[in-house]
Amino acid sequence: MSEIIKNRKEILFLYDLADGNPNGDPADENKPRIDEESGINIVTDVRLKRTIRDYLHDVENYELFVRQIADDAGLLQDAKARARDFLPKDLDLQSKTFQEAIKIIDNTILKECIDVRLFGATIPIELTLKKKEKGSITHTGPVQFKMGRSLHRVKLTYIKGTGAFASEAGKKQQTFREEWILPYTLIAFYGIINENRADETHLTEDDVKALYKGIWNGTKGLISRSKVGQVSRLLLVVTYKKPNFHIGELDKLISLTHEKASDEEIRDIGQVTLHADSLIKQLFDNKENIEKIDIMMDERLPLVDETDAAIDDLVTYLKGKGLTVAQLSF
């Protein structure tokens, strides 16, 4: 097993989607989430974490604490039952105190479940030893994301169509299908990996590498009807060597311009230009505090510097600024 992380890290992640819904709001007809004041598309941190979890479990075969498990009757397991899954089958429970049993569950979950090591969890415990007792385990995860926000205003579009079946038996009328989509959205996520919490959940460097794969490959590989076509565009991770230090708000250091009449007319990544001069300046100004920078960049990302020169290879570009940079590879 690799070492527990010792250094703070910041994450900037950009991805886009055309003609889809990156995060529907079930309380509002499952419409894409939009800040009504600014017209900005919002994607919750919970949506991104779910994407990461699904990829790590379904593709990389990691165990998760937070996942849907149903019995033979189709009834979903609750969190208390899920916690009991992590008691050894041969454990003599009657020989343990409640606190000893909780400790066993906690240690087993942290050892086996990468999502708790990454994101933390509040785990309710209900056990019957000499009597029924209740308690809980709480871990604040080292990895936390702000809500993702589009770098431009978006256009909410309503689509209506017909279904294949009759509206009810004996009727000629077909059912109607209704949905809300965004013609285009380019979303920025910002996150921090807190080294001070990593020791509590036993978060390792190998876990963090898996996280990066979950962000990049999970987003691109989320092939559902509303999200097919998502493309990961940029993943930048800054690892610091100065304790308890980070630049902050890396997502605010990227700006977008275009030649359309309005943001709402953007339909493709090729119609915008992303300006990285503020980001590059902050990285350069803080290079004495930075241990390394890891980057994954899509070849279609239209990134330019302060002279508006295209940055086709961000790794080479930042190395030229005297920074220690590496290409992420999955």
Image: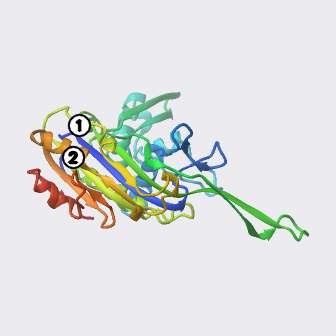
- Viewer-proximal residue among 232 and 258: 258
The vertical placement of 81 against 217, above or below, is: above
The vertical placement of 181 against 100, above or below, is: below
Residue 2 position in % (x across, y down):
19, 51
Give the residue at x 27% y 65%.
330
Q: Is residue 10 left or right of residue 269?
A: left
Residue 42 position in % (x across, y down):
49, 45
Q: Which residue is disc 1 drawn over?
A: 247
Q: Is residue 288 left or right of residue 8?
A: left
- Viewer-proximal residue among 319 and 175: 319
- State whether residue 36 appears in this view: yes
Give neighbour class at mark 1: few <14, some 14-19, many 20+ (Cα, 10 Å): some
Cα distance in 3D space between marks 2 and 1: 9 Å
Q: Mark 2 or 1 closer to N-term?
A: 2
- State whether residue 204 appears in this view: no
Q: Which residue is disc 2 drawn over?
A: 238
Residue 124 position in % (x across, y down):
49, 34
Residue 134: image tag: none
Residue 289 position in % (x across, y down):
12, 38
Q: Quadrant of residue 168?
A: bottom right
Q: Quadrant of residue 169?
A: bottom right
| Count of picture labels | 2
- Element carrying mark 2: strand
Q: Would you say the residues marked 2 and 1 are in contact, meaning their CB atoms lie under 8 Å apart? A: yes
The vertical placement of 53 against 117, above or below, is: below
The vertical placement of 311 against 131, above or below, is: below
Q: Amino acid at mark 2?
A: Val
Q: Amino acid at mark 1?
A: Ile
- Element carrying mark 1: loop
The image's colour scheme reads: rainbow
